[in-house]
Amino acid sequence: MKMLDYKDDPETWEKGYNLLYICNDRAIKPLSERKVIPGIYIGVIECDLKDVTAKSEFPLRSVEDVPFLNVYEQEDDEVPFDISDIIADKKARRDK
């Protein structure tokens, strides 16, 4: 895990800050409204490709080994490809 410093990568740090507040079901106070950057540890998990394994637990040897879906060939459904629905649900429950 690599710890982020706001001064070095403010965009990634702020993204982690916002996700932390949303996932903890807390109202976000935008950084632009704060007098100082809060003392929160925000990190990014990084690892070598050789350490990444698929569900089968076979080590990947190249990017081509990752089974990417062609989203244009999938049947239509309402499930997003990210966690935006989970975040929206938490925000909706918080704002009630």
Image (cartoon, grey):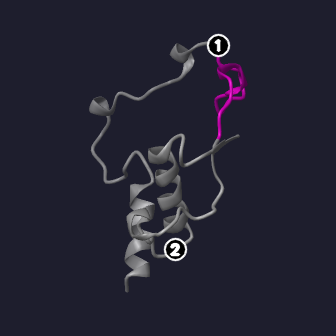
Q: Residues within 10 Å of mark 2 (few under 14, many from 20)?
A: some
- Indicate whether 9 appears above or below 24: above
* Secondary structure found at label 2: loop
Image spot of residue 48 (x, y percent): 68, 23
Side of 6 relative to 96 (left or right): right
Which residue lies at the image location 31% right of the left edge and 54% below the top edge?
78
Q: Main secondary structure of the magenta part?
A: loop
Image spot of residue 90 (x, y percent): 45, 71
Q: The C terminus appears in which quarter of the rendering?
A: bottom left
How far apart marks 1 and 2 lie (CA) works out to 39 Å
Q: The N terminus appears in which quarter of the rendering?
A: top right
- Decide which of 3, 75 is in the foreground and name it: 3
Which residue lies at the image location 39% right of the left edge and 56% below the top edge?
84
Residue 25 numbered tag: 2
Quarter of the rendering containing residue 24: bottom right
- Indicate whether 28 appears above or below 65: below
Residue denoted by label 1: 61
Which residue lies at the image location 39% right of the left edge and 70% below the top edge?
33
- Decide which of 11, 70 is in the foreground and name it: 11
Q: Which segment is the magenta one?
A: 45-60
- Decide which of 75, 52 is in the foreground and name it: 52
Q: Residues within 10 Å of mark 1 (few under 14, many from 20)?
A: few
Residue furthest bottom as drawn: 96
Quarter of the rendering containing residue 46: top right
Image spot of residue 71 (x, y percent): 32, 33
Side of 15 relative to 72 (left or right): right
Q: Earlier in the sequence, mark 1 or mark 2?
A: 2
Q: Amino acid at mark 1?
A: Arg
